[in-house]
Image (cartoon, rainbow, N blue to C red):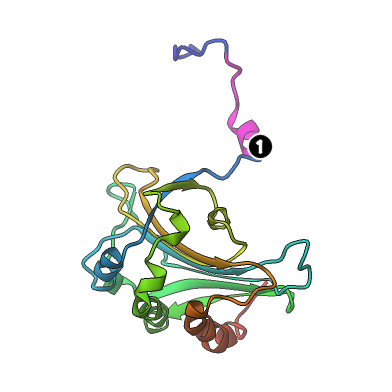
Amino acid sequence: MEKVNNNKQNAPQVLPTELASKNLPTPRIPREPITQEYFDEFMESTLQFSIVYFEYCMSYDENNPNARKQVFRLNTPMEIDTSTNLIRNRVLSDIIHSEAYYKDRDLSQAFRCDLSNNQVLKILQTMQSQGDYYFNAEEYGGEESLDIAMPRAFGHVNYITMTIEEPQLEPFDIPPHKTLCKGWDPGDDPPEELMPLINYLENVIFPEMRQHPYP
């Protein structure tokens, strides 16, 4: 088979099977702050996006090994436009339900189910009602964008984060990520501003999810 001249003739070839076996690092993605104006457009269904992620994560460190550990993830189901091979663009009002995953170390059990649009809207509306806190971009430290791999790179292992991925322009392209991340340290109480949202998750969403064990 003729080799393609890509100016790297001396580089060793890596087969797909070899590539798949390597523990490749999670890519660092430029993340721009979610502003109040941007989020309001998102809530009004005038802003197109490809995917939306939400995560509530609690972990522990060596100084607090007994701290509660749990994770809750929520995302809009991804749809592919077969005519373009792009993730289908949508607005919030297009979303009927979202996929939710929850795991609690104390229960040694995972749970998965769909949440209704009304349940998801309650989460988003709680954040919107406290826009001065969620959209102040303090986690960015004055930077316009941060290249990070995981939300904990913002500086906390306990956090609530949300990411809105803008529309894809090319297949397999990684579109701009608009992200917020509000965190606290193990052993500390969450910031007061996070409590309305945490209370809704803990007292409404999680009890329902515990009815749907995931093997």
In percent of width and height, residue 166 lies at: 32, 54
In the rendered structure, the answer to whether residue 80 lies left or right of residue 151 reads left
* Magenta region, residue range: 11-22
Residue 90 is drawn in which quadrant? bottom left
42 displayed left or right of 32:
left
- What residue is shown at x 60% (from left), y 25% (from top)? 14
- Within 10 angstroms of label 1, few (less than 14), some, or many (20 or more) residues? few
Q: For residue 17: magenta?
A: yes
**Image coordinates for residue 74, horizontal then vertical, percent:** 49, 70
Q: Extreme left residue here?
A: 46
Horizontal relation, residue 11 to residue 47: left or right = right
In the image, what residue occupies the spot 27% across and 70% down?
40
Q: Is 111 or 28 nearer to us in this picture?
A: 28
On the picture, is 121 further left or further right than 63?
left
User: x and y percent of residue 182 in the render?
Assistant: 50, 66
Q: Position of residue 176 (x, y in %)?
A: 36, 49
Q: Nearer the viewer, residue 69 or 51?
A: 69
Magenta stretch encompasses residue 180: no
Q: Which residue: 35% across, 80% down?
A: 129
- Which residue is tagged 1? 22
Q: How many marks?
A: 1
Secondary structure of the residue carrying tag 1 is loop
Residue 69 appears in which quarter of the rendering?
bottom right
The answer to which of 37 and 204 lies nearer the viewer is 37
**Amino acid on which the number 1 mark rests in the picture:** Lys
Q: Quadrant of residue 213?
A: bottom right
Q: Quadrant of the C terminus?
A: bottom right
